[in-house]
Image (tube, rainbow, N blue to C red):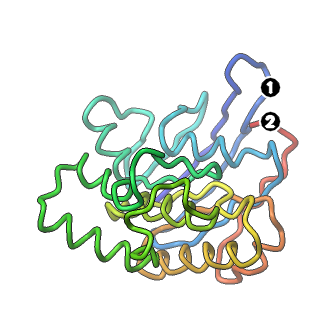
Amino acid sequence: MISFSHVDVRRPNAGDFSLLDFNATIEKGDLTVLFGGSGSGKTTIFKLLTREWTPDAGEIIVASTNIALLRGGSLAVYRRSIGYVSQTFPLLEDRTVEENIRLPLEINSMRKARLRDRLTSTLDRFHLKAAAKLFPKSLSASERQRVAIARAVVTEPMVLLADEPTAHLDPRGEEEIISLLRNENMRGMTVLLGTSDERLVATLPEARIISLTQPILQ
């Protein structure tokens, strides 16, 4: 489903490589972990998959399409097929939990009845019904990340990218988030998780691990 072939990326305004001759294949429905410390290239890979960046060399194929060639409407459609969660919990502070999660559905012009059903089922799946009318400032770090993941998957994207999704969480919050990501994968979603936490990797024995070890900067 996702293939990186001899991908090179240079950091903007710098001469050193962010990725050098990177090769990887991720199959549909996989739970895959990008494991590496700060500067190993995890965030670079996510920026490539969201098409924030394009490679300086090599190809990235997603669902049989070279994504570097996408333009205009085709690029917009592709980006809507990718769910992305960063470690900074970027929620809209002036919108409630419910409003944050429903925003992608409104952008996609989903019909009201279907939108209501999708929103209700997502709130239930992420244990957020009780918090639906709250604003982000009232939430714990774990709750904020649950909202961020729910918003990323509410449109049922083909891939979920999670960049250090348990950073800054206590052990209980970390366990909650990993359980939710595992559940989304079991529902059939392809999940690509980036982490530098070796202990977290040990909690995912079913995952495929891609180790990023080169001493490079993101």
Residue denoted by label 1: 16
Q: Marks 2 and 1: CB-CB under 8 Å?
A: yes
Q: Residue at x 42, y 41 (%)?
A: 66
Quarter of the image with the C terminus in it: top right
Q: Amino acid at mark 1?
A: Asp
Q: Residue furthest right?
A: 215
In the rendered image, which quarter is residue 158 located in? bottom left
Residue denoted by label 2: 217
The one nearer the camera, 214 or 81, is: 81
- Above/below status of 29 relative to 58: below
The one nearer the camera, 174 or 42, is: 174
Distance of label 2 from label 1 (alpha carbons):
8 Å
Q: x and y percent of residue 113 in the render? A: 12, 67
Q: Amino acid at mark 2?
A: Leu
- Above/below status of 131 relative to 159: below
Q: Residue at x 51, y 45 (%)?
A: 49
- Above/below status of 175 relative to 155: below
Quarter of the image with the N terminus in it: bottom left
Q: Earlier in the sequence, mark 2 or mark 1?
A: 1
Q: Horizontally, is 189 left or right of 145 in the view?
A: left
